Image (cartoon, rainbow, N blue to C red):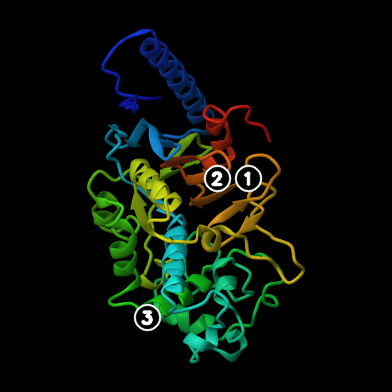
Amino acid sequence: MMNNRFTLLPKVKHFGLSAVCLFSSTFALAGDVDAFIEKTMTARHIPGLQLAVVKNNQVVKATSYGVANLQDNIAVTNQTVFSINSMTKAFTGVALVQLVEKGVISLDDEVAKHLPELPKAWHKIQIKHLMAHTSGLPKILSGYYIDLIVRGDPKAAWEKVQTLPMISDTNTRFDYNQTGYVIVGKIIDKYVDGSFVEFITDHQLKPVNMHLTAESGFEYMTPVIKNQARQYVYDHKEKRFVNIYGRFSYMMRTAAGMNSTAAELAQYLIALQANKLVKNTKLLWEPVKLNNGKISGFSKLENGYAIGWQVLDREHHPAVSASGGNAVTMIHYPENNVSIVVLTNLVGALPIQFVDGIAAHYIDDFKL
């Protein structure tokens, strides 16, 4: 299940012995990676996938595999745009740190400082707790896919969630929660010209030349987006693919809804590493500690959460990542200066579970 490959290879003008060896080793590596991806796609029933690899601040591989649209048998290309779902949170995190570096806010600020009209029970929650899912806030989603607690009515859902009790004491546990990102969106909107969508577009997407990402917007799959991959789930019982569709209202778009390509996200990671978007990536990527001094996240692998980014705190090859919809992942291994972007159109593909297998092809003596 693979077609439309495009791999970035080094340009060599003179084919001496060293050049031949370079091409030989590059092709061998590319073949190994492609074989790994093909095997993984088959095992996980992934229709289509984009891969981009960054090493030493250069894109060394940008390849597309499989089918973007099963209905019409349209192949994935490097210009195919994928829904990135909650990977959007990473861009919101960068937007916040940009405001911090401008002196507009602090991540330690309490909610009441910026939005005093919110319920008193929410006033002491710090912005970093909203971003790291340790706020203890009631949830604005029903628990069924992306449905709000008042289905189809964002205003009513926002009003209702403010009447609900706290789920837990603030910063005592990790509990994935979109309500905090709604609040963050309102804070950003208060201090920027226009909206948080315009702020992210003007201060992140445009400076990095993420034109396809900018043109695709923040509305998930609602509008017609040129060259967009359809999104699916795989019904193992019926052995068939099922279409996924949803809408994100404006207030939810700090949490999810963006679309992008692996190549543009690779350029984004390069820009972050070069401090072109924020001066202090430590502020962005350092995990938020709970009141007991520990960090917490989704799993033993993603065991911490920072400012919109997941943290893989481990002895060998620690990393930071941003994932979404259990379908897409971008990950940066700072000690190895390697970054990888994997976009799929299958909800449940969970590329975070196999991205280390790709990294092992680019990091010597990779071990966990």
- Labels 2 and 1 touching (C-beta < 8 A): yes
Who's the residue at 29% across and 56% down the image? Answer: 207
User: Disc number at residue 191?
Assistant: 3
Nearer to me, 188 or 105: 105
Q: Is residue 305 above or below residue 4?
A: below
Query: x, y percentage for residue 74?
Result: 27, 34
Mark 3 or mark 1, earlier in chain:
3
Quadrant the N terminus occupies: top left
Mark 2 residue element: loop
> Could you tell me the amino acid type at mark 1?
Pro
- Labels 3 and 1 touching (C-beta < 8 A): no
Residue named by callout 2? 334
Badge 1, how many Cα within 10 Å: few under 14, some, many 20+?
some
Query: x, y percentage for residue 337?
Result: 51, 40
Residue named by callout 1? 318
Mark 1 residue element: loop
Mark 3 residue element: helix
Query: x, y percentage for residue 314?
Result: 69, 46
Choose top left, top right, bottom left or bottom right for residue 221.
bottom left
Choose top left, top right, bottom left or bottom right for residue 367.
top right
Q: Nearer the viewer, mark 2 or mark 3?
A: 2
Q: CA distance from mark 2 to mark 1?
A: 7 Å
Who's the residue at 29% across and 59% down the image? Answer: 217
Mark 2 or mark 1, earlier in chain:
1
